[in-house]
Image (spheres, grey):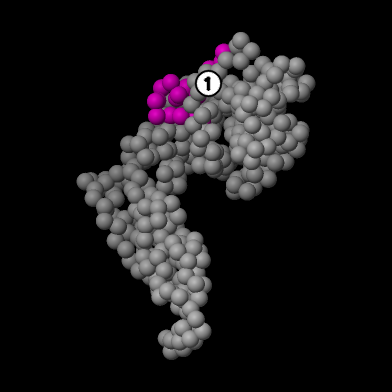
Amino acid sequence: MLRCILCLAVLICAAAHAAAPAAPRVMGRSWMMGDLTSGQVLVAEKADERIEPASLTKLMTAYLVFAALREKKLSLGQPVPVSPRAWRAPGSRMFIEPRKPVTVDELIKGMEVQSGNDACIALAEAVAGSEDVFAQMMNREAARLGMANSRFVNATGLPDAQHYSTARDLYILAAAVIRDFPEEYARYYAIKEFRYNNITQPNRNRLLWLDPTVDGVKTGHTDAAGYCLIASSKRGPRRLLSVLLGSTSESARAQESQKLLNWGYQFFDSVKLFGSGEVVRTLEVWKGAARVVKAGVKGELYVTVPKGEADKLKAELVAQQPLIAPVAQGQRVGTLRVALDGKPLAEYPLLALEAVGPAGIFGRAWDTLRLWIK
């Protein structure tokens, strides 16, 4: 197939041209930090090294619970029975009790704010009937999300040799929670404390108190995993996400995560290249009822670059030619390649913004002849 390459200059004003300084030194075993606005990872260290995810596991439990709520298999006000297995859960707890009503909403708060293992088991049983079946659902969802180096055997994160993940996979998972369930994320993950059964427990994410732009996500700790924190911050239109595993203390995981987030905001900009539905280019269509089709990108397109480097961005459109009708709306019709100072930065699919049906019999015959001559 022939390809048509069209160069598009990205005209963006910038005051300075200094490249971003090196990433800060971080006290931890592995980490990853990126800009969710653009989808770009800004720094990673040992991101594919397997670790014990501890209570960061609860993000996957939450993902499946939120999905069950969306599919109306659960409701927030629904009472959930407390099994002996949930009641006797070891580790952190929200202190649910048998024969005492507890709602799905309360259990989610107990899971996310208090990191209650008992809440996780009760929710897993409500969704899947048993924690073992729920773990199978967790693994299927992990595979669907592209978490290639993760395996779950429980809903809590309690230690098990066959229960593991990586900084990269946990980054994918946290990003999916924020992207796929924005209302649920906003409702639960910034809560600083929760009281249940006359016991008030604080959220262990210290950044919720230290940085008003931080609105989540989750802490974790075991002896083997060390002190872990997934943190997300939204400043203006930008949202950054950091995953820090294996730090040395509660205060260290907060300080080191804050260091990563501050570095990302201080030394990088997110630049909007195209808006949702904006026409990037019109492309020629053969054998179609229309001669051209409008092409653009899905949603708003941002790229993240070192501060002062935005005017060095260039976009190159590689169109699929010949483009033969019918063309469906949303069909991929090319690739948008973005480079910074001549170096490849990212690629994005270029999509048809409208449908183009086939031409009549004479139009198709004429274009067939034209293509043969061409």
Question: Residue drawn 40% across and 50% down?
Answer: 300
How many numbered callouts?
1
- Report whether residue 171 is seen: no
Q: Relative to 325, say whether 186 is above or below.
A: above
Q: Which residues are magenta?
A: 200-217
> Residue 30 at x, y = what percent?
52, 36
Give 138 or 66, whichever is nearer the viewer.
66
- Report whether residue 144 is seen: yes
- Reading the image, the residue beneath label 1 is 203
Q: Is residue 218 left or right of residue 81?
A: left
Q: Relative to 227, say whether 306 is above or below.
A: below
Question: Residue drawn 47% across and 22% down?
Answer: 206
> Residue 182 at x, y = what percent?
50, 37
Question: Residue drawn 70% across and 34% down?
Answer: 127
Q: Relative to 171, say whether 322 is above or below.
A: below
Instruction: Specify the quadrant that holds the C terminus.
Output: bottom left
> Residue 122 at x, y = what percent?
70, 26
- Magenta span contains residue 173: no
> Residue 153's quadrant in the figure?
top right
Question: Residue drawn 64% across and 41% down?
Answer: 71
Q: Residue furthest left?
A: 15
- Magenta span contains residue 215: yes
Three-letter amino acid code at the position of disc 1: Asn
> Residue 10 at x, y = what percent?
30, 57
Give 111 or 151, whichever is nearer the viewer.
111
Q: Residue furthest right?
A: 84
* Mark 1 secondary-structure assignment: loop
Estimate how packed mark 1 is, as few (under 14), some (14 to 19) or many (20 or more) residues with alpha carbons within 10 Å.
many
